[in-house]
């Protein structure tokens, strides 16, 4: 791989012109961006020649790892054949039709229809508009309110950020938009108090029922949640949580959207997170691993109950994107999903890799800084705490996690920090030997961090 600039030159150009997502631009300009130049398998390479194990699959998306030639070839072929045409005006293209059919086959049986978008955020925006359209067609236009959860993540558009429960995001730009309200999250480590996890799971789920009754059941349109909250810190709900949520949405007849942007396509060891937890959603929002990140693409899966009204009643749904059903993105998604099926990768995650990952990752719970080490499928999280076995966090929340993340990258491993929760979600194709390497780099990082914190009187 040749580059035309030195790292310092890239950094100067970046600081001069490039506004990054979710970034403090002033501090990044002072520090200089890391320039990732190429990657293969589970490894990234930067412009300084460092090789870094990508424990986060990019941003949760690179399920098949980097450098899969078949995906590049699918894009190249499709670009020559038909690089673009829209799906407005009664048109479609073969890869998009094939992808809708494939998604219907892979999804739980209630899903026979897909609406394509360019991202997870757009998929959630589409869900909000389609939910309200559905209730209007059903003659209940007063059903407007969508209930979501604090510390959930549903994207960064106006509706996506409103559905999400990130208070820092709401504080910039006057969010949430009207008609979106939040309840507590099923995060036992932080919010469980003296309850055992199962009791706490029921209590967290019943906040949904309380909120529905407070608003009035005839005003509630839908509930949305991630099966496992990803960006919020790999929050794996107690096993009592999702069955109780399902009971409540059934009881009040409200629509249920499962945000599968991270959980979808094998992350939990099932094709979709709702299958792991046994829920029956009316919508699934998809993106990220749908193309392994090789092309931007999102989709909204729509259950028959909704599709029958939308299609059956007729009338135009005034919504869509220039790139809805983009042929190149769809061709790459088809190739990606075909590899996932052909190589039985989801099954391999469930039966071989996730059990190995769980055994190795949970060893980290023995470290003096780790208050909890949890996994599900190929998710992992570590709660960093000053004193075990207390579940109290460090006093200045987030500072220790940031230090841990920076040390980890220096040691050649991408882990992400959510406050003081360290999280990992490696590519689904990671091997046991690569998991060993990941865990030993995490141990090395935790040991160094522990030494530094003791030196500073923080542990
Ligand atoms: C990343 C993410 C989104 C937003 O997807 P974008 O493609 O970044 O718009 C939505 N929901 C969840 C659960 C996500 O992790």
Image: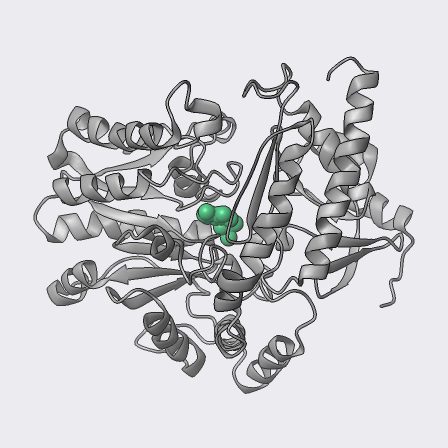
- Identify the residue at horizontal 40%, vertical 59% (top origin): 272
Does 107 appear above or below 153?
below
Q: Answer left or right for 191 relative to 425.
A: left
Q: Position of residue 142 (x, y in %)?
A: 13, 38
Which quadrant of the figure has residue 383? top right
Does 227 appear above or below 349?
above
Q: Is residue 26 visible?
A: no
Does 11 appear above or below 44?
above
Does 309 appear above or below 87?
above
- Identify the residue at horizontal 21%, vertical 26% (top origin): 210
- Identify the residue at horizontal 29%, vertical 27% (top origin): 203
> Considering depth in this image, is 415 or 391 the residue closer to the camera?
391
Q: Is residue 166 visible?
A: yes
Q: Position of residue 376 (x, y in %)?
A: 49, 48
- Identify the residue at horizontal 67%, vertical 60% (top origin): 432
Q: Position of residue 263 (x, y in %)?
A: 45, 53
> Considering depth in this image, is 150 or 390 the residue closer to the camera?
390
Q: Answer left or right for 437 relative to 93.
A: right
């Amino acid at each position: 791989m040749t580059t035309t600039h030195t790292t310092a030159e890239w950094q100067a150009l970046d600081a001069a012109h490039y506004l990054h997502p979710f970034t403090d631009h002033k501090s990044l300009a002072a520090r200089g961006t890391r320039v990732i130049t190429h990657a293969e398998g589970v490894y990234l390479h930067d412009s300084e020649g460092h090789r870094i194990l990508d424990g986060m699959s990019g941003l949760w998306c690179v399920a098949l790892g980097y450098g899969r030639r078949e995906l590049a070839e699918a894009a190249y072929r499709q670009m020559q054949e038909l690089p673009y045409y829209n799906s407005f005006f009664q048109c479609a293209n073969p890869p998009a039709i094939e992808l809708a059919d494939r998604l219907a086959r892979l999804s739980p049986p209630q899903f026979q229809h897909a609406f394509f978008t360019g991202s997870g955020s757009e998929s959630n925006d589409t869900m909000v508009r389609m939910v309200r359209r559905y209730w209007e067609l059903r003659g209940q236009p007063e059903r407007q309110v969508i209930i979501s959860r604090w510390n959930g993540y549903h994207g960064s558009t106006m509706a996506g950020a409103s559905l999400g429960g990130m208070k820092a995001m709401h504080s910039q730009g006057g969010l949430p938009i009207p008609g979106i309200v939040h309840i507590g999250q099923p995060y036992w480590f932080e919010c469980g108090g003296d309850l055992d996890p199962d009791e706490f799971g029921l209590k967290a789920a019943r906040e949904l029922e309380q909120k529905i009754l407070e608003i009035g059941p005839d005003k509630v349109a839908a509930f949305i949640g991630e099966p496992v909250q990803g960006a919020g810190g790999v929050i794996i709900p107690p096993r009592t949580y999702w069955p109780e949520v399902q009971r409540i949405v059934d009881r009040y007849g409200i629509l249920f959207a499962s945000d599968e942007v991270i959980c979808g396509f094998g992350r939990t060891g099932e094709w979709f997170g709702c299958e792991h937890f046994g829920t029956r959603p009316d919508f699934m929002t998809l993106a990220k691993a749908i193309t392994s990140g090789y092309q931007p693409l999102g989709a909204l899966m729509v259950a028959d109950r909704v599709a029958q009204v939308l299609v059956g009643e007729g009338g135009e749904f005034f919504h869509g994107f220039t790139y809805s059903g983009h042929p190149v993105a769809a061709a790459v998604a088809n190739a990606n999903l075909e590899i996932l099926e052909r190589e039985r990768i989801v099954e391999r995650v469930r039966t071989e890799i996730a059990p190995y990952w769980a055994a190795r990752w949970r060893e980290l719970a023995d470290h003096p800084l780790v208050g909890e080490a949890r996994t599900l499928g190929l998710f992992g999280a570590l709660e960093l705490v000053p004193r075990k076995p207390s579940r109290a966090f460090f006093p200045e929340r987030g500072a220790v996690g940031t230090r841990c993340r920076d040390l980890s990258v220096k040691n050649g491993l991408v882990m992400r920090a959510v406050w003081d929760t360290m999280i990992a979600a490696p590519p689904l194709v990671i091997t046991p030997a690569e998991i060993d390497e990941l865990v030993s780099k995490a141990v090395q990082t935790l040991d160094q961090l522990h030494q530094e914190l003791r030196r500073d009187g923080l542990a």
